[in-house]
Image (cartoon, rainbow, N blue to C red):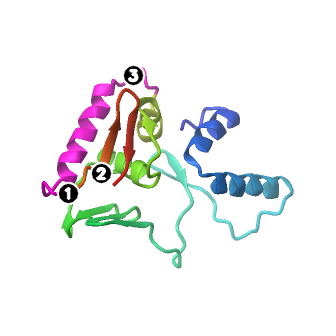
Amino acid sequence: MDLKDSGRQIGEKLFTLLSPCQKKELAQFVRDYEAGNIPADVPYLTLLRGQYFIPPQADQPLTEIREGDLYFCLEQHLVTVRSQVIPLTVKEFEIFALLILNPKRVFTYEMLLDLVWHEDYSYYSRKAINNHISNLRKKLRVAPDLPEYVKSVYGVGYKFEV
């Protein structure tokens, strides 16, 4: 997402990523914001690496996902398969995080470029994404009997599915 986009453009991109429940919660948050009912303890947004995020509170649990032999932790930037740490580049981790946090949801090449690279998709080629996905798959496949975690949807994009 580009912060130079209009609120509507950002909203449309964001809504493609949210579940129906998350959409309702976001709509309620906006209504509360407009009514002036946002509590004072909502943390301010912080700029980090060109993106805004809400700093985690000390008592917040980690974002962890376990799928068989696969372990993923967003906050620790950690991926392990069969207890073996998988060293991922920043882009590989960001791609994998987007996919694993939205299981079975297909992300087009354009969506990946927008959400991971934050760039106009005419600047990068599909080959760049294909290369990152290929490297990611090789790293995650530490044994031949493991499932292919990142699935291709021919001509469309990629998804996470076990």
> Which residue is at the front of the view, 43 or 13?
13
Query: Is 42 drawn above or below residue 91 in the view shown?
Result: below
Residue at left offset 40%, top offset 61% = 74
Quadrant of the rendered structure where residue 100 is? bottom left
**Magenta-drawn stretch contains 96:** no
Residue at left offset 45%, top offset 66% = 63
Mark seen at residue 123: 3
Tell me if mark 3 has few (under 14), some (14-19) or many (20+) residues whose alpha carbon lies within 10 angstroms of its own. few
Q: Which segment did they paint magenta?
A: 120-145
Q: Do the numbered discs 2 and 3 sit on residues whose CB atoms are within 8 Å?
A: no
| Residue at disc 1, secondary structure | loop
Q: Along the horizontal axis of the image, is 114 left or right of 146?
A: right
Q: Earlier in the sequence, mark 2 or mark 3?
A: 3
Query: Is 120 drawn above or below residue 137 in the view shown?
Result: above
Residue 161: image location, x then y, percent = 37, 51
> Which residue is at the front of the view, 147 or 93?
147
Q: Do the numbered discs 3 and 1 sit on residues whose CB atoms are within 8 Å?
A: no
Q: Do the numbered discs 1 and 2 sit on residues whose CB atoms are within 8 Å?
A: yes
Residue 13: image location, x then y, percent = 59, 38
Mark seen at residue 40: none
Screen quadrant of the C terminus: bottom left
| Residue at disc 2, secondary structure | loop
Name the residue carrying label 1.
146
Name the residue carrying label 2.
149
**Foreground tag (3 vs 1):** 1
Three-letter amino acid code at the position of disc 1: Leu
Q: Along the horizontal axis of the image, is 152 left or right of 131?
A: right
